[in-house]
Amino acid sequence: MNMIDLPDLKAKLWHQMRHDLKSLVPWFADNDLLLCPACCRPLRFDEFSLEHIIPQQALACDPLDVRDAVPRNERSGMTLMCRKPLVIKGRKIPGHGCNSWKGKFYDASLRDLIRADFQRKQLNSRHQIALFSAGYLALFRQFGYQIALLPSGLLMRNQFFHPNSFLRDVPLSCQVVLAGERLRSYEEGNREYWSEPFKITVDGASAFIVLRNMVLNLPLSRDPKLPLARALPYVPSKYAFRPDLRTAFE
C-alpha cells in the first residue's frame, strides 16, 4: 500500500500540532487556530494542506522495489503547511501559501539532490537552501513548535523565504552539504534508509540532519531535548522558553 488515508492523516497531524502549540503558548486553547511552521501565521484547519517534505516528484525516482515495499508518506516525511496566499510587503504572492512557495522554489532542487551522483553533480545555492529548508521542516516535525518559535527558528523561517542566497546570520557551518553514494535498491537491512528519510542528532547549539546520503548542520538556540519549565514563575535560563511569534517576512 503506497498511500495512507490522507484526510485522516491531516486531521491527526492537526490535533498533534495543536496539542503541542497549546502546551507552549497556552492562549491558543481559546481559539481553533494553528501556526504555519514556515510563515507562522495563525490559520484555520481549512487553510492548511498536507506537505511531503521530500516532494512526491522526488519519490517517484525511487527504485521500483522501494516504491513497492515502503509507503510514499513514510519515505517523504509529512507535516502541515499553509495554503492561504502569502502577502509580503503588501504584495499578494500567487499560489497557495507556503505550500506553493516550497513547491516553486525547492521541490525541483530536492529532486535533483535525491537523484544526484555527487561525484559528478555540482551544487548551487538553491540546492543548499532547499536542503536547509527541508532540514528545518524535519526538525519541526520531530521536536514541534519549540523549534519554530526559537530565535534560531525565526532565522530558519526567514531563510525559507530567501531561496537564492544564504542570509548573513546563517552560520557558515550550516552552508555546507556533505554527501556520499546513495543506495540504489531495497533490502530488509536498509529499510530505515528509505522509510525514515531524516535522522537527527542534536549536539548543543547544532542539529545534524541526515537526509538519506546527505548531511547538513542547522543552528539551534537551545537543545530541544532539555525540559521546558511550564509552571514555575522563575526558572533557570536554560529552562526558559520565550516564544517568538513573528511571521518570517515581517
Image (cartoon, rainbow, N blue to C red):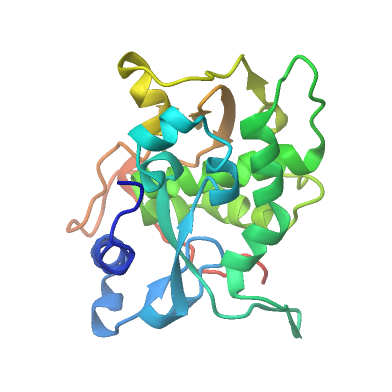
Q: Quadrant of residue 68?
A: top left
Q: Looking at the picture, does residue 159 appear above or below residue 169? A: below
Q: Quadrant of residue 218?
A: top right
Q: Position of residue 143 (x, y in %)?
A: 35, 45
Q: Name the residue rendered at 35%, 47% in the picture.
A: 2
Give left or right: position of 88 versus 240: right
Residue 199 in view (yes/no): no
Give left or right: position of 25 versus 132: left
**84 or 68, which lies in front?**
68
**41 or 219, which lies in front?**
41
**33 or 77, which lies in front?**
77
Q: Where is residue 22 in the image (x, y as percent from the top left)?
A: 26, 68
Quadrant of image for the C terminus: bottom right
Give left or right: position of 133 versus 175: left
Q: Name the residue rendered at 25%, 42% in the picture.
A: 227
Q: Looking at the picture, does residue 101 appear above or below residue 201? A: below
Q: Position of residue 248 (x, y in %)?
A: 62, 65
Q: Looking at the picture, does residue 167 appear above or below residue 63? A: below
Q: Name the residue rendered at 71%, 37% in the picture.
A: 128
Q: How many labels does the image show?
A: 0
Residue 103 in view (yes/no): yes
